[in-house]
Image (cartoon, coloured by chain):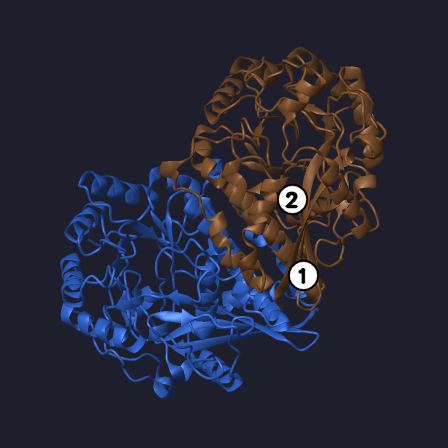
Chain colours: A blue, B brown
Amino acid sequence: MKIVEMRFHPIAIADPPIRSSYGLHAPYALRTIIELVSDDGVIGITETYGGDSQVAGLEALRSQIIGADPYRLTGFLSSLVEGVKPSGEVRNDRSQTFLVPGENPLDATTRTFAAIEVACLDLIGKSVGKPVCDLIGGRVRNEVPFSAYLFYKHPGGGGEGTDARSDEYGEVLTPDSLLREAKQMIDAYGFESIKLKAGVLHPDIEIESMKVLYRELGVKYPLRIDPNCAWSVDTSVRVGLELAKELSGEGYLEDPCASLEGMAEVRRRLDEAGVNTPLASNVAVTSFGDLPKSIPLRAVQVVLCDHHYWGGMRQVQHLAKVCQVFGMGLSMHSNSHLGVSLMAMAHVAAATPHLTYACDTHYPWSATSDEVCAGGRVPITNGCVKITDKPGLGVELDYDQLARGRERYARCPYRKRDDELEMRKHVDPTWKRILPRW
Amino acid sequence: MKIVEMRFHPIAIADPPIRSSYGLHAPYALRTIIELVSDDGVIGITETYGGDSQVAGLEALRSQIIGADPYRLTGFLSSLVEGVKPSGEVRNDRSQTFLVPGENPLDATTRTFAAIEVACLDLIGKSVGKPVCDLIGGRVRNEVPFSAYLFYKHPGGGGEGTDARSDEYGEVLTPDSLLREAKQMIDAYGFESIKLKAGVLHPDIEIESMKVLYRELGVKYPLRIDPNCAWSVDTSVRVGLELAKELSGEGYLEDPCASLEGMAEVRRRLDEAGVNTPLASNVAVTSFGDLPKSIPLRAVQVVLCDHHYWGGMRQVQHLAKVCQVFGMGLSMHSNSHLGVSLMAMAHVAAATPHLTYACDTHYPWSATSDEVCAGGRVPITNGCVKITDKPGLGVELDYDQLARGRERYARCPYRKRDDELEMRKHVDPTWKRILPRW
């Protein structure tokens, strides 16, 4: 079996005006759908970050991909994910504190590799009639739990002009409207844990938001809060103490402040106060090179992996082992995405024994009108994505929908994510991302 | 595809009277060959440690194996390799200092899992016509380098009665005869690096042996020495200093003394003397649970993995990532084995980017007369095993040879390896393993 054709589909999908400490989501999120076609006509697909730089990174490998055996391509390209520096030379210049995921130049090669690996695995799975999770060690679970991912948001459903979506959740900028959003999302998807994207409103309001969720929904729903480094160490500790009860059980405090040293200081001070809420991260730790420094500092207790930028499914499985060995938990980070990414996340999660928390997903923030999976949206039932016996990732492309996504991309005026710019355009013309803000 | 039959073949192979700090190899080494047969008649094979306890461990899983899909069986049985304790609870009772590999009860479940995983991968590979290395991430090399593995030995070729083999290497108990053994083995296999199993003669003789090898063979052959913990910390440091030149380049000093603390002390004192010879180990570090303690102590700079007891090929790949991330090297440990194990070692090595040294192998100490691979011995050329496009592990069984191995097993009076007992029977009736001996 040889790969004879490679097709990239840069697409744009309507994205509601949701907020984070990075700023505001633009009306469109950019994604890339990739197809690898074999000489026997089987098509392997994947989805990754969007914009011109992603496509350029993939295009640069075209001559190595065409003609390759999908079973061997990942070995052939392995230098793309083998750039970890030994512990003596840990990179201290991690840029994910400042750049959103997908725009971190330190991840460029691992992002590219991941896209190719997943497409190859889907191609192999569809060729032999086996699900991807069963090609990479075998499933350890048939249902992969995801968490409700709550955002503060402005009115609007995302998209512009003919692409404009109806506003499913309305304006959410208070504790009470956040509770409404949570109930609505749980009703629709059955999630059994909840994460709040914080660092948007004053910490007192966000603390109150979490207390309302805890009080009104009860301990059945473990709570997580993620201000993306918006807080100082002092504020992080204050929030950790005030939410000790609300974040207990399966909860965690995610990236309250910037830097491994800051996180370690928060850990030390929470420990001193007898609060053992784990600190999670997809900012302080975003690559294997961060671990040798993070582990002895005890900066991070839960790593939020993401196969899209950690270098693919097998690298996530390696990471899971590192986490298990060093007593850390593992969960999964998400960005705006469609069903192909959701299924890839579910498949690697299914084949990763040491996955200790429900995964994040932005999937509820996308719409049926933008879904490129044949048959429509991937169901999330009781908060879980089901792993079936369908081959590969278990989804095929709807080419009409894909064409509409490409048209939206053509209409969309930008080629990379810039949440700060969007804040200035739509909310506050003087807005800057300041760390720490509080 | 379902597994409909599982066959175990306990076999004995003639093993020469080679020495180590554990004692003396008995006239037979015990191995187990495993076959998993699918409903479409494809047969997946593997080779593992021998004796009744190995077979019992596998037999206990029969009801879970029969009827299973080989793509899913490893996921289903993953609890066998997921027993790593978090870093706070590292096991300090590692018994490999005292028990030979294959007889360490702490490895029992990972040994069993590894055998099943490799047999499943061979079955899958043979089913889809792909080599095992290309099922687990894809080869990063087509030739896997192995090291000459020199032993001091008594006269005799191994086996007894009609199984007795001719003595290929004669008595080797002096520096000069060791040089002869090295030249003979290099002539036959083209090895480009050399390891000496030491801890057998007085350290001064072993130092002299290494100096003779270095002087007579030249720096083309990186040298390693492994006394299996026979030395005190003081002796370890003395040998490390006296062999600083001989072990430089791609050389290492393996398990000079017992315990992580002992190894760390040797490291510290060699560093102080400006000698950076890496310390390698397959005794102080034999499982993931040893790493959280070993790494901050800097006890081990090169981990010698072994898919047979680390839990299989994918666990070795995880280990390689840990080593890469924490700035450690990776090589491969060996025990007396036949061609099926050699091919499994070669396939996982081929698909492991961070393999930084030539692997160990006992293969030259086995004989054509005992080989169970169809077509005879696996060739080692220029010190390398070639990875071809043959499906699975690239070897099939010779059932006549297998039957002879079973007959030898039936004739063989013991069911586990006991090198100390052999020393008392054949060399010194009062011999005991004493650590440190020197």
Q: How many marks?
A: 2
Which chain letter goes with mark 1?
B
Which chain letter goes with mark 2?
B
Give the camera-side residue of A80 and B340.
B340
The reply, left or right, for residue B391 in relation to residue A336 is right
Give the camera-side residue of A12 and B183.
B183
Q: Amino acid at mark 1?
A: Val
Tell me if residue B354 can be seen: no
Residue matched to label 2? B48
Q: Amino acid at mark 2?
A: Thr
Tell me if residue A390 can be seen: yes
- Measured from the top left, where is residue B106 in percent x and y? 50, 38
Quadrant the C terminus of chain B occupies: top right
Quadrant the N terminus of chain B occupies: bottom right
Secondary structure beneath dot 1 equals strand
Can you tell which quarter of the image residue A30 is in?
bottom left
Residue matched to label 1? B37
Q: Residues within 10 Å of mark 1 (few under 14, many from 20)?
A: many
Give the camera-side residue of A228 and B68.
B68
Comes first in the chain, label 2 or label 1: 1
- Measured from the top left, where is residue A81 in percent x and y? 55, 52
Instruction: Decide: is A412 above or below A330.
Output: below
- Measured from the top left, where is residue B95 in percent x and y? 50, 30
The reply, left or right, for residue B212 in relation to residue A89 is right
The reply, left or right, for residue A412 in relation to residue B232 is left
Can you tell which quarter of the image residue A27 is in?
bottom left
